[in-house]
Amino acid sequence: MSIWPRVLITGADGQVGRALLTSFAGSAEVIGCNRASLDLANADQIRKKVRAVAPDIIVNAGAYTAVDHAESERDLSFAINGRAPGILAEEAQRASALLIHYSTDYVFNGSKKGPWVEDDATDPLSVYGASKLAGEEAIRNVGGRHLIFRTSWVYAPEGKNFVLTMLRLGRERDSLNVVDDQVGAPTTAGELARATHAIATGILEKKFGADRTLSGVYHMTCSGSVSWCGFARAIFKRAHKLLGDKTPKVNPIATSDYPTLAKRPHNSVLSNDKLQRTFNMRLAPWQSALDEVLAAIAAYPRP
Ligand SMILES: NC(=O)c1ccc[n+]([C@@H]2O[C@H](COP(=O)([O-])OP(=O)(O)OC[C@H]3O[C@@H](n4cnc5c(N)ncnc54)[C@H](OP(=O)(O)O)[C@@H]3O)[C@@H](O)[C@H]2O)c1
């Protein structure tokens, strides 16, 4: 019999899902499920899969993440982001497993002056944000052992993300307009996965005390903050050094000059103090995490 914990990871083809597969490999029996092997919109499939796997830990990295499309796909985004986490929580409780789930900075309205703390009032501006908040509430209502990590501006060397979009646009254009009045903490999937793995392992080893009292919401982002425009400039500056890419001119614009279907918060910065206090965990500064991702991109052949 294996003495390794059995870890069920949903959304295993996504940015965070892939990074989790890497982080847990070598210290857990990992069962990664993508949409084809576990459709989070299908409640029966979720129950059957969890019962068949009998995991010690469920990490729910699957989500409906198309923020603008969610405005016109409310039912689907609520099924995946709002209802599925509650079913996973019920099944985790039934299996005496720990549920780890990711939520978002978009549960807030962005109006606060300083970093948001976990107890600040939520007020999502978009369907996506509302659906993720419903997922948090569904997990809390079940009341089993759970950790909800709210994160922001996630990217990885592969996937659909701002960094890869900027690198592509930078090759195609000499100048770009990028929003400068939305501030947040760009966070790599790799940093999230490493921290998740360390915390999950620590909980199994009872490093942090009684794990039922640890249940709740934690903010988990890379440290520091920047606007999308500042982030774009940093991407091009560092990509020039690491990848030899040309450096386009980046013009700051206001959110009002770049209308999107879903409204986004102006201030998305999350305080990570609770994460540090509870688990002695701090993620890397966004600048060094960006360098790590760019170095990984540099290692791939590009078209
Ligand atoms: N990306 C961000 O900027 C960001 C910011 C804050 C919080 N988060 C949260 O962080 C977590 C991980 O996000 P991520 O960046 O890794 O997102 P991602 O790259 O979009 O990955 C999400 C994964 O979920 C899968 N999925 C979608 N619908 C599904 C369904 N019905 N059944 C099963 N799987 C389904 C997707 O599969 P397909 O590829 O087949 O669609 C995809 O592989 C999510 O909870 C997200 O809400 C993300």
Image: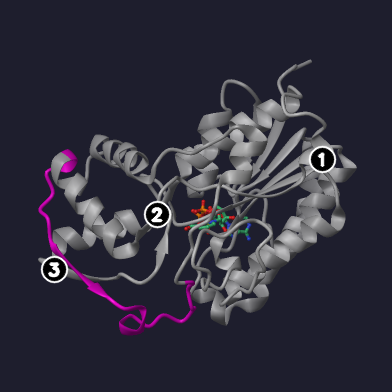
Q: Which mark is residue 175?
A: 3
Q: Which residue is mark 2?
A: 225
Q: CA distance from mark 2 to mark 3?
A: 23 Å
> Does residue 287 show up?
yes
Q: In the picture, residue 260 is in which quadrant? A: bottom left
Residue 238 position (above or below residue 79):
above
Q: How many marks?
A: 3
Structural distance between the alpha carbons of marks 3 and 1: 51 Å
- Lateral position of residue 245 relative to residue 148, left or right: left
Ligand 1 contact, mark 2 (Cβ < 8 Å)? no
Nearer to us: label 2 or label 3 = 2
Q: Are marks 2 and 3 in contact (CB under 8 Å)?
A: no
> Mark 3 vs mark 1: which is more N-terminal?
3
In this view, the residue farthest toward the right is: 94
Q: Position of residue 135 (x, y in %)?
A: 71, 62
Which amino acid lies under the numbered mark 1 shown in the image of this protein? Thr
**Residue type at the position of mark 3:** Ser
Quadrant of the image occupied by residue 82: bottom right
The quadrant in which residue 71 appears is: bottom right
Kindly tell me whether mark 3's CB lies below 8 Å from ligand 1: no
Residue highlighted by disc 1: 213
- Give, as a single range, the part of the protein colored magenta: 242-265
Percent coordinates x, y for residue 161 in the rendering: 38, 57
Q: Quadrant of the N terminus?
A: top right
Coloring scheme used: one colour
Indicate whether residue 205 is drawn in magenta: no
- Inspect the image, locate mark 2, and give the three-letter code of the amino acid beneath it: Ser
